[in-house]
Image (tube, rainbow, N blue to C red):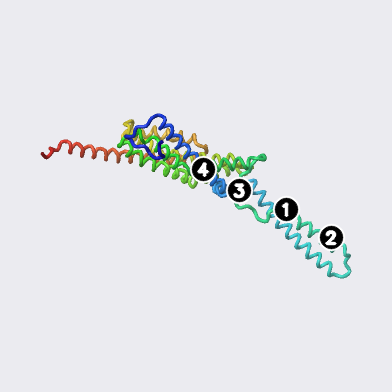
Amino acid sequence: MTTLRPIRHEDRLSVLDHLDELRKRLFVSVGALLLAFCVCFAFNGQLIRVLNRPLPPAATTGLGSQNTQDAALHKGFVKIEKAASGLSGSFARSHGVAPGASREFAQLAAAAREVAKELPANASSQEKPITFGVSEAFTTTLMVVGYFALMITLPILLYQLYAFVIPALGKDERRVAVPSMIAAPLLFVAGCVFTYFAIVPPAIHFLQGYNSNDFQNLLQAKAYYKFEIILMMGIGLAFQVPLLLLALQKVGVITASTLTLNWRYATVLIAVIAAALPGVDPVSMFMETLPLVLLYLSSIVLLKFVERRNRRRLLAEAKRATRPSDD
């Protein structure tokens, strides 16, 4: 029976052994995903507030303006209640005044107090997305929790994939695969964090504020969260470009010179990829294109460094091979 560990390159396994190992690694992956899902579901409110953070202030939107007006009405009715209560007391202490006037002001104060209770005391400082139907709030929460669980368990999923394919890799290939598998989750997280802080806020502010005087923007929760999460995951995957180019260089498909000579075509391709991602406004496209171009340029530097190191290693091996052996 196989154990749950990376199989060595020299190990020989039957088809059933490979299937058994695959079953175990799938079981571990699904278990980690379910555990992350349960943990994320327990903190779904905090996760949703994290996604709501890039939203503009509520006072700048139609729903936010209504919320601000309700808060102003609350303050107005509180003032009416205080004024009516004061007048009621004054009329009660005055002589020669009909007692009905005092009761009328008391009733006005009570009515103003009841209306003020139904209105929010303070305007919300941030817009909240809206949901439609009975179950959309629940299903949208499940969608957010599922995406977060997938992002959290990505390092475990990548390790299980690496541990399963490692027997097919030679010693030299494994020397490249191990750092790549370590760097892949880090680059993915870096892409998600960059998108959350640098791309999403200006994109949301631009899109929500565009012609805001002529439109009443009602931000649907499911559409907004899907836009934000898919954008983060798309940029996170795009941050894997250096690893992809390094792998292509390793198998001899490209070199650093290839990337340098074709940088114009690469820039056009990057622009097409940015256009395919959520957010078609110029702000989003620029903020998506810029890091990808920088990653492409850094990949050229990385490939040149790797090629220079490989040349030095080959020269050292050639010198050792031509050096006369001591008898």
Q: If you read the primary sequence from the N terminus, does the residue marked by circle 1 or circle 2 appear first?
A: 2
Q: Amino acid at mark 1?
A: Glu
Q: Amino acid at mark 3?
A: Glu
* Whether residue 233 can be seen here: yes
Q: If you read the primary sequence from the N terminus, does the residue marked by circle 4 or circle 3 appear first?
A: 3
Question: Where in the figure is residue 298, as x and y percent of width and height?
Answer: 36, 41
Gap between marks 1 and 2, in whole Å? 22 Å
Mark 3 or 1: the one toward you: 1
The 10 Å Cα crowd at callout 1, few under 14, some 14 to 19, many 20 or more, is: few
The 10 Å Cα crowd at callout 2, few under 14, some 14 to 19, many 20 or more, is: some
Query: Which residue lies at the image location 39% right of the left edge and 43% below the top edge?
Result: 182
Gap between marks 3 and 2, in whole Å? 40 Å
The residue pinned by badge 2 equals 104
Q: Horizontal placement of 95 versus 316: left or right?
A: right
Q: Describe the element under mark 3 as helix, strand or loop.
A: loop
Question: Answer yes or no: do the residues labelled 4 and 3 have beta carbons within 8 Å?
Answer: no
Front residue of 140/325: it is: 325
Question: Where in the figure is residue 197, as x and y percent of width and height?
Answer: 49, 47
Query: Which residue lies at the image location 69% right of the left edge and 52% below the top edge?
Result: 70
Q: Quadrant of residue 131?
A: top right
Gap between marks 4 and 1, in whole Å? 39 Å
Front residue of 125/134: it is: 134
Q: Amino acid at mark 2?
A: Glu
The residue pinned by badge 3 equals 127
Q: Quadrant of the C terminus?
A: top left
Q: Describe the element under mark 4 as helix, strand or loop.
A: helix
Q: If you read the primary sequence from the N terminus, does the residue marked by circle 4 or circle 1 appear first?
A: 1
The residue pinned by badge 4 equals 149
* Whether residue 217 can be seen here: no
Question: Where in the figure is residue 292, as x and y percent of width and height?
Answer: 42, 39
Q: If you read the primary sequence from the N terminus, does the residue marked by circle 3 or circle 2 appear first?
A: 2
Number of marks in picture: 4
